[in-house]
Amino acid sequence: GIDQDCDGVDLTVSGPTVADLAVGDLVITEILQNPNAVSDADGEWFELRAAAPFHLNGVEFGREGTIESTVEANECILVGTDDVVVVARGSDPTTNGGLTPVSAEFDFSLGNSDGSLFVGYAGTVLDEITWASSVSGATTALDPSITDAAGNDDPLNWCTSTVPYGDGDLGRVRHHLADHEVAVAGGHDRPDVAAVVAHPVGDADAARLTCGARRAEVARAVGRRRRAEVG
């Protein structure tokens, strides 16, 4: 079993666990499907924002309705309200494109086009996104002013990142959890994993400006089309 509430006993509820999460309590806020600095198998990752406190053990990741990975950590990882965590194909920054810190790993391909990703628990989807295409070497990030699962359903709230991180790919890579052991999804045992330390990388304000500029550009384009139709 999985010690979801960090009390040393499997499946015993005595604190905020993933089982307490409701739909929308975890929001997908950034994703890199097509890294350029390293291979997809080494450099894919996505970011989650928590709207409620819980322990990461037991969280499921998947695509197209199929659960592909489940977080099964040797040590419990407490996620607080408004914490942001990164889930990646690998936690070693020397091979994952310089991404750090990583809170959990997954072991399936995201897909560069016509893809989907969901996060859930016990078969219940908490949040899900889809995409038609991706940009090589750059994440697609949710506008930082958008913090709910409904907001990330609107394509206009997503923008291509422009700030480099690590080995040169572009991504926001915002604040993350404090010191903890990396969790490994998929049931693979990984002892002696070094702790990682949270630190800010990238520029959320720049991302917000980029998203705002995109929405303004779309609004102008719609206005021009309407005026042309009237004329």
Image: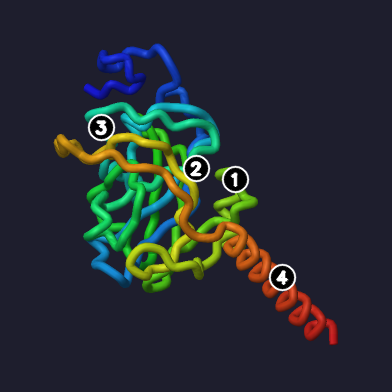
What is the quadrant of residue 124 in the picture? top left
Residue 64 in sight:
no
Q: Is residue 80 above or below residue 231?
A: above
Residue linked to disc 1: 147
Asked if disc 2 and disc 1 are in contact, CB closer than 8 Å, the reply is yes
Contact flag, marks 1 and 3 (Cβ < 8 Å): no
Residue at the image position 37 percent from the left and 73 percent from the top: 136
Q: The disc labelled 3 sits on which kind of residue?
A: Ala
Q: Which residue is mark 4?
A: 216
Secondary element at tag 3: loop
Q: According to the image, label 2 marks what residue?
A: 49
Read off the residue under disc 3: 73
Label 2 is placed on what type of residue?
Arg
Q: Which of the two discs, 1 and 4, labels the residue nearer the N terminus? A: 1
Say which residue appears at 71% left-offset and 78% top-offset.
Answer: 221
Horizontally, residue 221 falls left or right of residue 12, namely: right
Tell me where residue 190 appears, x and y as whole percent: 16, 38
Residue at the image point whose x is 33% and y is 47% from the top: 102
